[in-house]
Amino acid sequence: MITSFIRKFTIVFYISIMISSYGIFFPLYVMAAQNEPDTTNISVLSQKQENNMDLPQGKAKQDGDQKLVSTSFSSEKEEAIVSAIEKLYSRSNFSCAYHQRSTLKALGISEDAWGRAFFSHPGKMRWEYKEPEIHKIISDGRNLWIYRPEEKQVLQGDAAVFFRGGAGGAFLSDISSVREDYTLFVSENNLDTTAIYLTMVPKNETPDIASIKIRVIKDSYIIQKVTTTNAYGDTTEITFSEIEFGELDDSLFHFTVPEGVDVIPMG
């Protein structure tokens, strides 16, 4: 009963996160990011105040007087990193395995999901959920389908309309919209020395996205994790692995409604 409620209550949030995060998944071969960070902007926070800080997998948070030091990069370096992302967004098609954890803060409950995703520029994607329930989320850049075979139904709508405001189609097809719609912050911290973080905060308030935090592995500049928080404090954290780059069959991004399946329009 509870798991069914989570799936239905957060379905819009899930999809918004997936699509808005699309371009961020590409590896960032950012040569400009090899420069030393500007340490003129340093904030020191109590370790206990940073309970939500992403740490490397398997690394426990430490008690005591240890402090977490978050270091911001210079505006020039931030510009170099964002410019490199813009340049790379339209280059590669790729697939990856993912683990997704979605949490409803008000209810204090979470749900984990696993599967494989496929991405093709511009704006094409396919999410194949294997656990806990088989379903697919597919977009050809114009249309959006959410297919739930166990329920024998597919939700169908216009991707660009459904994900307006930079959180959907516009974000996928034009990375420059990120600068228009979000305030960007690039940082690193002393307790996670293998990564840098890109935090995106919408310039205009929206209930779907309060912030997007992206963890980038320093040595390879590959996106390892994307955490999105909405206005209610609910979070969706997606961790990526088994990333493979190369051509993808375009049929992956089209959907034919199976016989006997109900089509439900999304407004």
Image (cartoon, rainbow, N blue to C red):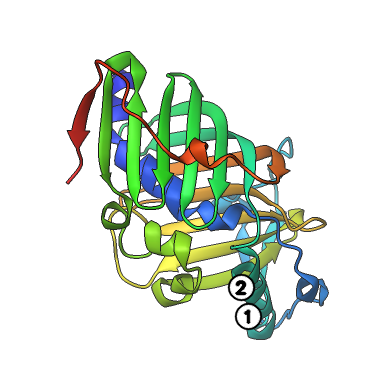
Provide residue 45's location: percent of width, then percent of height.
60, 62
- Residue 206 seen in the current view: yes
Packing grade of label 2 (10 A; few <14, some 14-19, many >=20) is many
Q: Quadrant of residue 211?
A: bottom left
Above or below 55: residue 112 = above
- Residue 52 seen in the current view: no
Q: Which residue is drawn at 68% across and 78% down?
A: 80
Amino acid on which disc 1 is placed: Glu
- Which residue is identified by label 1? 79
- Closer to us: 113 or 174: 174
Q: Quadrant of residue 265?
A: top left
Q: On the picture, is 3 further left or further right than 156?
A: right
The mark total stands at 2
Provide residue 137's location: percent of width, then percent of height.
41, 35
SS of the residue under disc 2: helix
Provide residue 202's location: percent of width, then percent of height.
39, 67
- Which residue is identified by label 2? 82
Q: On the picture, is 225 further left or further right than 58?
A: left
Of the 4 image quadrants, the one containing the N terminus is top left
Q: Residue at x 63, y 53 (%)?
A: 47
- Mark 2 vs 1: CB contact within 8 A: yes
SS of the residue under disc 1: helix
Task: Determine which of the numbered discs, if any, sits on residue 24 in the image.
Answer: none
Amino acid on which disc 2 is placed: Val
- Closer to us: 1 or 11: 11
Q: Residue at x 17, y 46 (%)?
A: 267
- Closer to us: 45 or 167: 167
Q: Residue at x 69, y 44 (%)?
A: 63
